[in-house]
Image (cartoon, coloured by chain):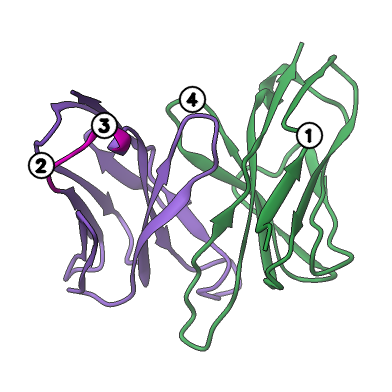
Amino acid sequence: GQQLNQSPQSMFIQEGEDVSMNCTSSSIFNTWLWYKQDPGEGPVLLIALYKAGELTSNGRLTAQFGITRKDSFLNISASIPSDVGIYFCAGQGVDGRGSTLGRLYFGRGTQLTVWP
Amino acid sequence: NAGVTQTPKFRILKIGQSMTLQCTQDMNHNYMYWYRQDPGMGLKLIYYSVGAGITDKGEVPNGYNVSRSTTEDFPLRLELAAPSQTSVYFCASSYSSQRGYNEQFFGPGTRLTVL
């Protein structure tokens, strides 16, 4: 399967600091998605990116779809305690029948801890 | 809309037992998925379905079976539970669009322990 490398694996920051995490792939993706998972819950979609070079914001979150289509990053500005959780990147690939639909490949996640 | 619902939330099985994890979505999504999440490993796709009556294997299908008789339901079956299947299982659904986007919406998960 396609491999996504997400870094860093974990981050410990102080409230108010900015955060940056990224994801790289050995393959080209058509869509990049960023999810957040709170403890005991399922992942929740934060931002979706559909075009190479696209830069999209959602409140304090900003994400970009890399020009090469093999990477994406997520920035969180002015972190707050409720930003704590695991952040996952996901790329939409191509399945065995050549369809671009129905398959997402996930990174291993970035565990974010915010100290007050 | 309730979104994606999963039952049960927790389950402990003995080795060799079988069970079905239930998943239902009320968003009329045609695509549905089953993932397992192991600590520090992200999500791995088990099976997915592009519509009623159509299913396909993901990355880690061994030991599992699925069926999709309706648009709303996508149960996951474990026939002979093994300790390696201890994990958190997530069901997800998405819609297909002309532009091919795949924004998946996840259920709250089922935490399964096999002893």
Secondary element at image label 4 = loop
In this figure, which residue is indicated by the disc labeled 3?
A81
Where residue B95 sits, quadrant-wise, is bottom right
Which chain is home to disc 2?
A
Q: Colour in which chain B is shown?
A: green
Q: Are marks 1 and 4 on the same chain?
A: yes
Which chain is home to disc 1?
B
Q: Is residue B10 above or below residue A59?
A: above
The disc label shown at residue A18, or none: 2
Task: Give x and y (percent) for residue B58.
Answer: 63, 52
Image quadrant where one finds the C terminus of chain A: top left
Q: Nearer the viewer, residue A71 or A35?
A: A35
Task: Give x and y (percent) for residue A10.
Answer: 26, 28
From the viewer's perspective, is the residue at label 2 or at label 3 nearer?
A: 3
Tell me which amino acid carries mark 4.
Answer: Pro
**Region in magenta:** A77-82
Neighbour class for label 2 at 10 Å: few (<14), some, many (≥20)? Answer: some
Q: Is residue B85 above or below residue A71?
A: above
In this figure, which residue is indicated by the disc labeled 1?
B8
In this figure, which residue is indicated by the disc labeled 4?
B39
Q: Is residue A52 left or right of residue A107?
A: left
From the viewer's perspective, is the residue at label 2 or at label 4 nearer?
A: 2
Marks 2 and 3, how far apart at CA = 12 Å
Q: Residue drawn at (23%, 59%), measured in percent from left and top?
A: A59
